Amino acid sequence: MKIRTYLCVAVAAVLLAAGCTSGTDDADVADTAGTTDTATPTDEAAATETSAAPSDAFGVEFVYANPYGFGDLDPSSAFSNENTILQNLYETLTWLADPEASDEVSGVLAESWSSNADATEWTFKIRESVTFHDGTPLTAGAVRDSLQRTIDLGLGAAFILSSVESMEVPDDHTLTFKLAWPTPLDLVMSSQYSVYVVCPSAVGNDAAWFNEGNACGTGPYTIDSHDPAGSTWLARFDDYWGGWSDDQVETVEMRLIEDPVLAEQLIRNGDAHFTYNLPFDVYTSLEQDSDIDVLRSLSMTNLFGMLNVRRLSPEIREALVLSFPYDDVTAALYGGEAVRARGMVPLTVWGSSPDLDIPATDLDRARQLIEAAGADGLTVTYSFDAGTTEQQQIGEVWKANLSTIGVNLELEPLTWDARWEKAKSDPDAAQDVFTMFWFPTYVTPYDFLFSTFHSEEAPFFNLGYYSNETFDALIDEADAISGTDREAASELFRQAQEILIDDHAAVFMLDVPSVEVLRAEFTGHIPNPAYNTVVRFYELRAVR
């Protein structure tokens, strides 16, 4: 980076000020998985503030200090931080146990599965002797009806089921899917969104019913009480098919703690047992405490800033991209553990392109672009999550860079829900830069690219309001062949990312490291980048 030596002192000063311390018959089986050895529940998680304990609290209690609230508890449409609670209330057909080692999935509600040679027909054998929270037995028909609800609603991550043409139930424990194009459906069914199995009695209910704190799945926990502004309490489901032992967590409080300083205090005092999203400079101190485990692991999460194409010309967007202090931010934040993003797809996800031609910081060229556009004195709004130290520090450093080329960066910290609603309401009056973390729906480049840059009729997560028919066609085709020709799909995903870079659609900042904090009196939590910040409470064991 040409300007690094000139920026080092300025960056250090700004950081200090910001607080930095397959076409044959079924005999040709393509993929098969057997019965899992242990229960692997997959459900959602909530974020709340302190409220009254559940009416019948008992046994081992676990407190999850969650920095974000839950905007939607409907398992068919939720598509944000609700993954942390949904993974414990509901279950899916499959689960991706170790994405670092393999993309082979394990069974949860599916005992086995197979596909024809071109992956256009899949048959799943549904686990027997499983009951829903209301006592209804799990059947293949119930799975079909639940997934059909998601398809019919067409909300959240329902796009991952877009290849499904029909679902047939030859018997109570067999479900066959016929697809419009080849799809790795076993991997799709491991998603942390939109493929949860809901009780037949709840399939006809609307989102309001779920958001009142009602839930009905097959997972190991049920909702005991729900306060969106406080705490959501979970209680164990006594008849869970995996069974129970005395050292397992029976009561969970999902407590909304938006202040990272308070979350740190709660962890240190033992008043909370798990959290994440703390200022990165506190982890070294926490690692000195024998009562606390700091868990560093593989990440499939990135941080990027979508640029508002409605408000910013191509020249101004290019200037913003060139003004960003990539190397300095990477070195100074996240303990130096972050990696410069190489486009939108994190380097740990298949189909990423480590050799993409990405821009370097070039303030001279950025200044020329601003002057040519007659934009000297321009103010650009930078929307980020209030309380997220690294996002604020990034804004402060970027602001210092932009001030040298006659552009003012106005930092706009808001809660996630507030800024998301603002961004969706009126693109022409919205922010100029929308920063966001993205983590997998299921592990595929399509999710990273479709959810954030594919053309939308109404804004949802494409909050730079980008639209490019060529880009859309490339990623749609890549997705359609990813089940049979991953190499060719990867090349198409690469071409799509090149378009985003050439169009200056976003500032691709960082692939961020994963760091979670767990009190040492619990074991059994293994961070999994395919299920970001999810704790499967059923797998925890109390040791003290």
Image (cartoon, grey):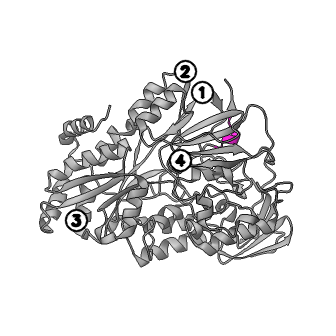
- Could you say which is closer to the camera, residue 537 or residue 313? 537
Which of the two discs, 1 and 4, labels the residue nearer the N terminus? 4
CA distance separating discs 2 and 1: 8 Å
Which of the two discs, 3 and 1, labels the residue nearer the N terminus? 3
Which of the two discs, 3 and 4, labels the residue nearer the N terminus? 4
Which of the two discs, 2 and 1, labels the residue nearer the N terminus? 2
Q: What stretch is highlighted in magenta?
A: 536-540
Q: In this view, does 421 lie to the left or right of 311?
A: right
* Number of the label disc, if any, that sits on residue 290: 2
For the residue marked with disc 3, what is the amino acid? Ile
Counting other residues with Cα less than 10 Å from the Cα at mark 3, is it few (<14), some (14-19), or many (20 or more)?
many
Residue position for label 1: 520
For the residue marked with disc 2, what is the amino acid? Ser
Magenta highlight on residue 539 = yes
Does residue 98 appear in the picture of this structure? yes
Which of the two discs, 4 and 2, labels the residue nearer the N terminus? 4
User: Which SS type dominates the magenta stretch?
Assistant: helix
Q: In this view, does 312 lie to the left or right of 240?
A: left
Does residue 30 appear in the picture of this structure? no
